[in-house]
Image (cartoon, rainbow, N blue to C red):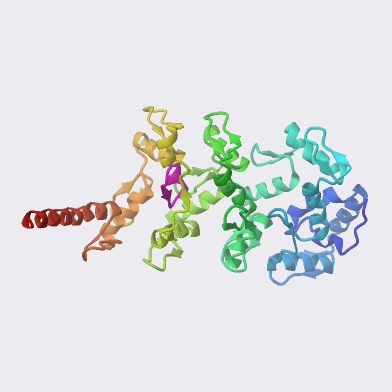
Amino acid sequence: MQNYNDEDHKIINKDGVFADEWSQCEELLSESEQFKVKQEIQTGDRPYEYNQCDEAFLNSSQHESHVLAHSVEILYQCSHCDKAFSHDALLKSHMHSHTGEGSHQCSECGKAFLYNNQLITHMRTHTGEKPYQCNQCDKAFSIKSNLTSHKRIHTGEKPFQCTQCDMAFSNNSYLKTHMRVHTGEKPFKCSQCDKAFAQNSHLISHMTIHTGERPYQCSQCGKDFTLNTHLVRHMKIHTGEKPHQCIHCNKAFLFNSELTLHMKIHTGERPYQCQECNKTFLCNSHLKRHMRIHTGESPFECNQCDKAFIRNSELSRHMSIHTGKRPYQCSQCGKDFVSNGELNSHMKVHSGERPYQCSQCDNSFARRSHLMRHMRTHTGERPYPCSECDKSFLTNGNLKRHLKTHTDEKEYSIYVQSILQK
C-alpha cells in the first residue's frame, strides 16, 4: 500500500469538520496507519486554534485544512462527476470508480477497487448489509460517513456555513454544490443541446428528455423515475415515513429541507423578491420558476405534441392526457390524481385540515396558494393587469375571464362592420 506523509494526512480530523471524509480515509489507510492517526487524536493535545470557530487541531496541516473548509475551496474536482475532494489521494482513489482499475473485483457486478476494504464496503450494496445503526432512530447505513451525516438531523448541527449567504449545511458536499448558486458554475453540459447544470444528477435527469429512459420503477404503484434517489424519495410516500416534525403545528415531512421551507410559513420569512413585480418567495427555486412568467420560458416540452410548460409538474399533468395514467388514488373516495401533491391537497377535503391561517382575520385555508390569494383582499394587491385596458385583478383566472370581454367586443365589432359593409 502507498505510504502517506503528514501533508497527506492534513484532512484527517475525526472530531472536527472533516468527519465526513474520515471514513473515506479509513478506506485508504492501512490498519497501522489508522491506529497511528487515532492515537494522535486521542492525546487531546491541540495547540493550533482557529479564531473563526472553537476548533483546535493537532498540527499545523490539520489547522490549514480546517481553514480551507471555511473558505470552501474545492481543491480536487473529479472531471467525470460532481464529486470534489479536499485531497488528491481521495480523488485518485475515487477515479478508479470511473477507470475500472483495481485488483479487487466484485464477483456480482465486476466493478474493481484499488483496496480490499473498498470492495468490502461496495459489497454491502449487493448484500443490503447496513452495520452502522443510528442510536436515535431505527435507520441504519452501509457507510459510516452516511451515519455521521444522518446524526446531524437529530442534533440539528450544520457545521458547513456558506460564506456568501446565511445558509448552512450538515454535509460538506451539500455546501460545495450550493456554492455554485453564487459562482454560477455549471460544469455538467448536455451533449444533445446547449443546456448546462450545476450537478451531475441534474444532467442525468435532463438526458432522459432526449432518451426517454426512466429505468427506476416503483414496485408499489408502477411509477417510473429517472434517478434512483427519486425512487427512494418516492417510496417514503408508501411507507408513510416522515421523520422531520414541525414544533409549531406538528406537521411532518420526508426531508429536513421540506421542514426548513415549511418553517418560513410560521416565521413569515420570504427573502426572495422578484425584480419585475416585487412578489416574494420562500425559496430561490420558487423565484426562478416564477421568473419564467416574465421571460416566457417554458422549458418542459411534451414529446407527444407541441405544448410546453413552465413547471415539470404541469408537464406531468398534461402527459396524463396522452398516457391516461393517474397513479395516485384517494383511499376515501377512489378519485385518481396525476401527482402525489394533488392527492395530498385533495385529502384535506376529507380531513378538514386547513393549516394555512390568515394573520389578519380568522380565515384559514387548505392550500397556501388559497391563503396568498386571500391575503390580497387585505393588502389590496392586484398583480394581474390587463394588457387591453387599465384594469387589474386579484387572480390570473379573473384576468382570463376579463380578457374574454375584450375578445367578445372585438368579435362583435367585426360582425357589425361586416353588416354595415353589405
Q: Residue 76 appears at what percent x and percent y?
A: 76, 61
Vertical position of residue 75 compared to residue 307: above or below? below
Instruction: Locate the C terminus by quadrant.
Output: bottom left
Q: How many marks?
A: 0
The residue drawn where x is 33% and y is 49% is: 370
Q: Residue 20 appears at what percent x and percent y?
A: 73, 53
Q: Residue 161 appears at what percent x and percent y?
A: 63, 63
The residue most toward the front is 422
Horizontal relation, residue 286 to residue 143: left or right: left
Verify whether residue 379 appears in magenta. no
Verify whether residue 309 appears in magenta. yes
The magenta-colored residue range is 305-317
The answer to whether one can see residue 134 in this image is yes
Horizontal relation, residue 281 to residue 3: left or right: left
Q: Residue 331 appears at what percent x and percent y?
A: 42, 28
Q: In this orientation, which residue lies closer to the viewer: 322 or 278?
A: 322
The residue drawn where x is 26% and y is 53% is: 400
Q: In this orientation, which residue lies closer to the viewer: 138 or 81?
A: 81
Question: Which corner quadrant of the image does residue 54 belong to?
Answer: bottom right
Horizontal relation, residue 4 to residue 21: left or right: right
The answer to whether one can see residue 326 in this image is no
Horizontal relation, residue 157 to residue 109: left or right: left
Q: In this orientation, which residue lies closer to the viewer: 111 or 128?
A: 111
The residue drawn where x is 57% and y is 29% is: 219
Q: In this orientation, which residue lies closer to the viewer: 72 or 20?
A: 72
